[in-house]
Amino acid sequence: MRIKKVSTFLLFILIAFYAKAQGTEAYQSKHFIKDADTLLYRVLYPENFDENKKYPILLFLHGAGERGNDNKKQLTHGSILFTSSKIRQDYPAIIIFPQCAENDYWSKVKVNRKKSPIGLKFKYKKGPTTSLALTMELLDSITAQKYSNKDQVYVMGLSMGGMGTYEILSRKPNTFAAAIPICGGGDPKTASNYATKTPIWTFHGAEDNVVSPQESLTMVSAILKANGKPRFTLYENANHNSWDSAFAESLLLPWLFSHSLKK
């Protein structure tokens, strides 16, 4: 009986692994070159993609653990959220997963890893990091295409990517129709740049011992102070991987794709 239970469990793991592998294979491997710098990225096009139609664009920024140059690790979290046939049918969109370089960061921030949760000091005035600057250039090149719906450009990210989400909002406040930062943080002084322009749904875990939930609370408070109306979900029992709970939200994608730029 025990052998049978173990075998069933292993079979479940193999099926889950196969399903994830099949999902990530749908993302095409690409690279973007600007001057002497290269940004690796993956892109998922809608089924039956037609360049004569217009599609929403979603930019997804991964966490620090997925940095590198393999053009694969950035798909670890969140990529299969968009690969099921039903999701691709209900929300035909162009999904972009850039990969941050190993020695870089999505946000201009000084990170103190000797503290727990980590200490963060944002320095947006020093300009974007190379990886974020390349990502903004990539996004501009894609939204310039005739098949891009410029009224439906979205950004979401987790952990380091949540920090990048807040920063890219501050640097491109007229670009995004909605944003989802998960367990991140940002510079509250820049919230007024986008507070009334971009609907935001922020997620965090109350037990997060990597990035303090106070970071999200600070940004939500700053957005409110700037007359924005953010949506905020705090999971009382979640640690740093609050993205798992966020991805399981049934209203996540309906909420995101329901927004268009205000005219």
Image (cartoon, rainbow, N blue to C red):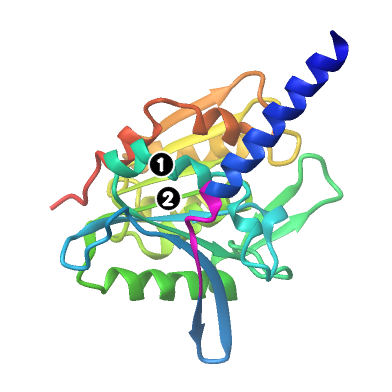
How many neighbours does mark 1 have within 10 angstroms: few (below 14), some (14-19), or many (20 or more)? many
**Residue shown at the point (33%, 71%) measured from the top left:** 142
Numbered label attached to residue 176? none
What is the total number of numbered labels drawn onto the structure image? 2
SS for dot 2: helix
Residue at the disc numbered 1: 223
Q: Quadrant of residue 199?
A: top left
Q: Position of residue 61 (x, y in %)?
A: 53, 55
Observer-nearest of 181 and 18: 18
Q: Position of residue 121 (x, y in %)?
A: 67, 56
Is residue 129 visible from the viewing direction of this image? no
**Quick check: 201 above or below 149?**
above
In the displayed structure image, the side of residue 203 where residue 69 appears, left or right: right
SS for dot 1: helix
Range drawn in magenta: 23-30
Instruction: Give yes or no for contact between labels 2 and 1 (Cβ–Cβ under 8 Å).
Output: yes
**Quick check: 34 above or below 198?**
below
Observer-nearest of 103 and 129: 103
Is residue 107 visible from the viewing direction of this image? yes
**Quick check: 156 above or below 230?**
below
Q: Position of residue 183 (x, y in %)?
A: 60, 40
Residue type (three-letter) at the residue carrying disc 2 = Ala
Queried whether the magenta region covers residue 13, the answer comes back as no
Which comes before the other along the chain, label 2 or label 1?
2
In the displayed structure image, the side of residue 35 where residue 151 appears, left or right: left
Observer-nearest of 199 and 92: 92
Residue at the disc numbered 2: 191
Residue type (three-letter) at the residue carrying disc 1 = Ile
Q: Quadrant of residue 239?
A: top right
